[in-house]
Structure formats: structure tokens, C-alpha cells
Amino acid sequence: MTNFGLYVLNDIYLDTLYPDKYPQDKNDKRPFYLAIKDDSKEQVYWCIPLSSKTEKYAPIIKKIPNAGIIAHLYGEKDSAILTQNIVPVPVHYIEREFMLNDIHFVIKDSNLINEIDKKARVIIALIKNKNFKFFENCKEMYNSL
């Protein structure tokens, strides 16, 4: 597993553990997830869903900056990196790397990495330390790992 690499989660995780209110589009194994290693649990990554629906998420991100980032990662369109929908994932639920031109896609831009990491750490802290209904499923899942 590579920090800030993109991955596909397996159907068992998506069908049984993934919160219902989070993006559910699984056609062609979408959404893809950006993985960040958990600081305290060895075999756990925090996975952030990506979406091509930037018009839908841009107003939310403008209103709540830690909700995510709109960025150009690959291809012709921007992607929404939905830090508000971050989930803890044990590595055995990671199905495979997301490949682009037969190469594992990993974010290399240090400014983008820093921005994603900063927003993700805010959300992770809320999940771990606060009792917000929106993050209730993630907190329970994380604590059970």
C-alpha cells in the first residue's frame, strides 16, 4: 500500500461496511479511493472517495472547506476528493490498485498532498474524538478494528 495512492475497495466492504449515505456508485468499480495510512492501527488505511461530480460537490466544499477539494488528477476532468466521506478500511478489503496506463496512480504533487492531508486529519480527528451523528458509523467501525 502506498500513501496517497488510489485504490478500489472490494464488494464485501462496499456492500456491508460502507456507510449508506456516502457515494455508492460502484459501476466499473467506482468510486476510487485515495488511501492514507492510519497513524495508530497497523493494517488500517483511511480511504477518501473520489467523484467526477464536481458540480454537485463544489458548493458543499465552498461552504465547508474541510469537506473536500476539487483538483485535476488525471484525464480531461477534475475530480472531487471527498474528505468528508473518509472511511477506515482494513487492508484486506482493498481489492486492487487503481491503474492508469498500467501504472498505479499515486498523487505526487506535494502541495495537493499537504492540502488533502490537512483536511483529512481534521475529519479523522472529528471521527475519533467527537460524537457527530454524520460520522457515527465510521467511529463505530474504527473503534471495532
Image (cartoon, grey):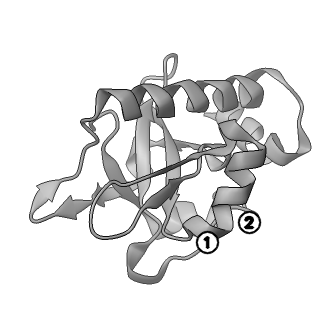
Which residue reaches farthest top? Answer: 40
**Residue 2: percent from left, percent from top:** 27, 36
Name the side, left or right, on which 80 lies relative to 55.
left
Q: Amino acid at mark 2?
A: Asp
Q: Quadrant of residue 108?
A: top left
Question: Which quadrant is the N terminus positioned in?
Answer: top left
Residue linked to disc 2: 20
> Residue drawn 58% across and 32% down?
120
**Is 71 placed left or right of 95 in the picture?**
right
Give me the C-alpha separation between circle 1 and circle 2: 7 Å
Q: Residue furthest bottom?
A: 27
Viewer-proximal residue among 102 and 43: 102
Could you say which is closer to the camera, residue 22 or residue 16? 22
Q: Position of residue 112 (x, y in %)?
A: 39, 35
Vertical position of residue 133 compared to residue 2: above or below: below
Badge 1 element: loop
Q: Quadrant of residue 91?
A: top left
Q: Secondary structure at mark 2?
A: loop
Quadrant in which the C terminus appears? top right
- Are discs 1 and 2 less than 8 Å apart at CB? yes
6 above or below 10?
above
The front one of 36 and 76 is 76
Q: Residue at x 74, y 54 (%)?
A: 60
Q: Position of residue 94 (x, y in %)?
A: 38, 53
Seen from the viewer's position, the closer of residues 41 and 61 is 61
Residue at 70 percent across and 22 percent down: it is 125
Q: Which residue is mark 1?
A: 24
Query: Residue 128 at what x, y percent from top left?
Result: 73, 25
